[in-house]
Image: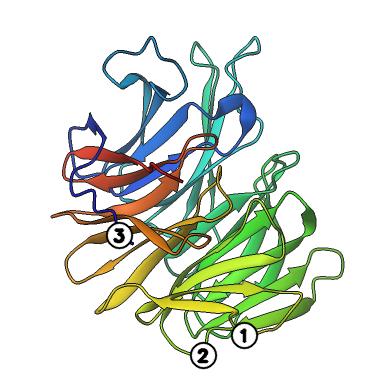
Amino acid sequence: MTETKPSSTYTIPCSDTVQCVEFSPFEWSCQLLAVGTPSCISVFSCRFQEEDVKISKGIEYTRLRDFSTKCNTLAIAWSPQTSLQVLPKIMSFAAATDDRTLQIFMTDLNTSHSVKVLSGHKDFVNAITYDPSEGSLVASTGDDLTCRVWSVADGQQESLFQLTSPGVSVCWHNDEPYKLMVAQKDGTIRFFSLHNQQPIMSLSCGQTPLLSADWSRHNHLLVGAVAGTEWMVFNVSVSSLPIERRQAHSEGACQFRWSRCHESLLATSGRPGRELKVFNTRHQQLHVNTSLKVSYSLSWHLHLPIVAVGGDRAVHLWTVESI
């Protein structure tokens, strides 16, 4: 069964092409959406009708602050230290930019504002993530065949894992705080121990290029990825090969993200054009199947079945229904 939703449910206008979007995955800051454009990152506070029926237009959003990057944003990750419910307020996130650095932004949205630059990668950084418990570490991976772990406090590199192919995704999991998952472009997904700095195990997609992978928030045994034209799901307790795979995008799949609020939903993007699809693995149903003129990045809201995509001077958001 296919449910096609060609037009987005909500739109947030922006002044430039949106290259990167990221909802905060943490309970105390889940209303925050970071939006990366060629010269800055804007942070919005969003509320939806799905969580408050008093919101008559479906969405209410406020731009809280713009952060200058002076270059293109390739990836964004929120720090679990972010909270607007404490005094002083804390907003902190990391961005990978096309000057091959990481930038750590921190502000109280009042008088205190700092940017810390982490240098060391020799090529473009493709993905970043914070340790989900304390936010004292940030991990990054990229085209220089490394995954690096940094101390947020002093900006120093604490660990370096050598890869055999460019790193395209890196994930930490709440239930596995001493493991890092790193996806390589050659179709291999590797797990590393932060205890002894050694590889633990690996998964094989069986095809290339692998361009994106994600670790299920709901089940630490499930990993999803897109490689070639397919999306695939692994259960690490069963096999190093996929337990399920489906055709996703006939000319190449580019991105994969598990839903943060529903264990059976996944979103992918790919070619031809700029396709976006949302699939339900439980009911074998395609909830969203559409194409955009411009499409970058994917991010799910923590509590709502809402997926955000960067577009031409706008963030497009789809609400997935009938799940």
168 in relation to 263, above or below: below
Q: Is residue 42 left or right of residue 235?
A: left
At label 1, counting other C-alpha atoms closer than 10 Å, the crowd grade (few under 14, some 14-19, many 20 or more) is some
- CA separation in Å, label 3 and label 1: 27 Å
- Which circle's residue, 3 or 1, is located before the other in the chain? 3
Q: Identify which amino acid the numbered label 2 is placed on.
A: Gly
Please identify, in this view, whether the residue under mark 2 or under mark 3 is nearer the observer: 3
In-front residue for pair 259/212: 259
- Which circle's residue, 2 or 1, is located before the other in the chain? 2
Q: Quadrant of residue 189?
A: bottom right
Q: Identify which amino acid the numbered label 3 is placed on.
A: Thr
Residue in the picture at 61% in, 59% down? 171
Residue 241 numbered mark, or none: 1
In-front residue for pair 9/311: 9
Residue in the picture at 41% in, 82% down? 209
Asked if marks 2 and 1 touch (Cβ < 8 Å), the reply is yes
In the picture of the structure, the residue carrying the numbered disc 2 is 206
Q: Is residue 80 left or right of residue 225?
A: right
Q: Identify which amino acid the numbered label 1 is placed on.
A: Leu
Residue in the picture at 80% in, 63% down? 194
Query: Element at badge 3?
Result: loop
For the N terminus, the image quarter is bottom left
Residue 2 numbered mark, or none: 3
Q: Quadrant of residue 106?
A: top right
139 in relation to 164, above or below: above
Residue in the picture at 61% in, 69% down? 182
In-front residue for pair 175/151: 175
- Which circle's residue, 2 or 3, is located before the other in the chain? 3
55 in relation to 118, above or below: above
At label 3, counting other C-alpha atoms closer than 10 Å, the crowd grade (few under 14, some 14-19, many 20 or more) is few
